[in-house]
Amino acid sequence: MISAERLSPEQARVLRALLTGTGIVVAGVLPGFLTASLAPRIRMDFAFSKATVGLAVSIFYVVCALLSTPCGRLVGRIGVLPSMRLAAATTAVSCLAVALFANSAAALTALILVGGIGNSTAGPAASALLAREVATHRQGLAFGAQQSGASIGALMAGLALPVVAIPFGWRWAFVAAAVLSVAAAAFAPGDGKPAAADRRPTAPHRPGFTEVHGLALGAAAASAAGVGFISFLVLYSVENGLSELAAGLLLVGVSLVATLSRLALGAVGDRAGQDPLPPTAAMIAVSVLGYAALVTGLPGLIVAGALLAGCTGWSWPAGLTLAVVRRSPESPAWAVGVLMAGLFGGAAVGPVLVGVLADRVSFTSAWAACAALALTSAVAIGATSRRGPA
């Protein structure tokens, strides 16, 4: 094993950037994921139905979708380090406020909206940091690590139920998220000065413009399917025979395979001349089989389907992040901001769609909707890839 003393100053700086970028993304997604994963415990304190859970998570992502592109521009103006501090502060304030003051579904929803500012800033800031610190031929793996922050956040949210919420109370999980956010920002390298590559170019018709927005649409559909699926996996599993502990551990397992698949897809993108879009589209298409397995309602197939959907349907952020940064090398923060706007827009639609369908029709129709969204995303990304390699 390589010790810290054997790392060169440049390697140590890159490692620090990777840890910081991943950590700030993990912290940013936690308000939404904790709200979903802790729902079985939160509803012991106040009314919190499936539809309300979906609405709360969706509103959180609506804020993220609206702010993501402006926050991408903000990162270019004020620099990486101040942006990370802003992300950490707003996330920490949001989580602490939930722990202290959330006494109704409406109050909890309002308080996690503050965290939307942090989540909107975290992605562009982390991407700009990695684009600056990591060599081009290693950026695929770097973005895979950064984008695994979302799945690691889901993993931590899954662990929070059996490890924190059941023995100590769900509010302490939000306190822990606040501490993580502050710690990640404190570890960030850099002097905080905006890099030239962080600024959005002024040319309105440059070649990568429409491709970036096209990929954002594909991200919106994939995100709607993936976040809708993750937001209700615990509740669905419990209703179909799994214990709270088993359901929480299943979410952990799904998050783990999603993390590994993001790293693998990023590494594939680092290969010389390799366009990350075709394998990304293929993996999203395969996730349809996972959603089909969920429809059965059988505990064994729920576990198998969830793991397949997590491995394939949640692998795409690394590939798409690498693709948009390659298409906009002079403005990575702006490009990632546009991509994240699509991601968050889909994340806003997915939970409320799944929640309403589960409440008023059935979970079968909800999982069918996730499968349709995943297929739509795969087609959109595949069509963009045929325009030419990154």
Image: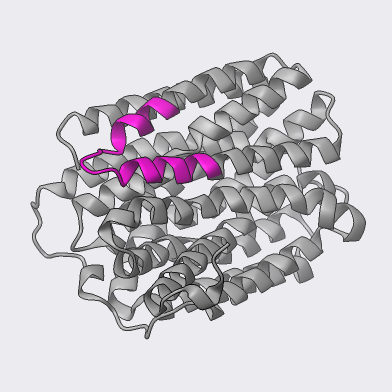
Q: Please identify the residue farthest to the bottom as the structure is shown.
A: 191
Location of the C terminus (image quadrant)? top left
* Nearer to us in this view, 229 or 116: 229
Residue name at image x 64 percent, y 69 percent: 180
Magenta span: helix, strand or loop, mainly? helix
**Magenta stretch: includes residue 31:** no
Q: Please identify the residue farthest to the top as the structure is shown.
A: 296
Location of the N terminus (image quadrant)? bottom right
Please, is residue 190 above or below residue 146 in the view? below
Q: Which residues are magenta?
A: 260-283
Residue 156 placement (x, y as % from top left): 68, 53
> 370 left or right of 316?
right
Residue name at image x 22 percent, y 63 percent: 331
Residue 185 placement (x, y as % from top left): 53, 76
Residue 282 placement (x, y as % from top left): 38, 25
Please, is residue 210 above or below residue 372 in the view? below
Whether residue 352 is visible here, answered yes or no, is no
Residue 375 placement (x, y as % from top left): 41, 23
> 305 left or right of 129?
right
Residue name at image x 76 percent, y 40 percent: 249
In the rendered image, which quarter is residue 28 located in?
A: bottom right
Residue name at image x 67 percent, y 26 percent: 358
Please, is residue 67 above or below residue 39 in the view? below
In the rendered image, which quarter is residue 353 located in?
A: top right
How was the colour assigned to the protein in this rendering?
A: one colour
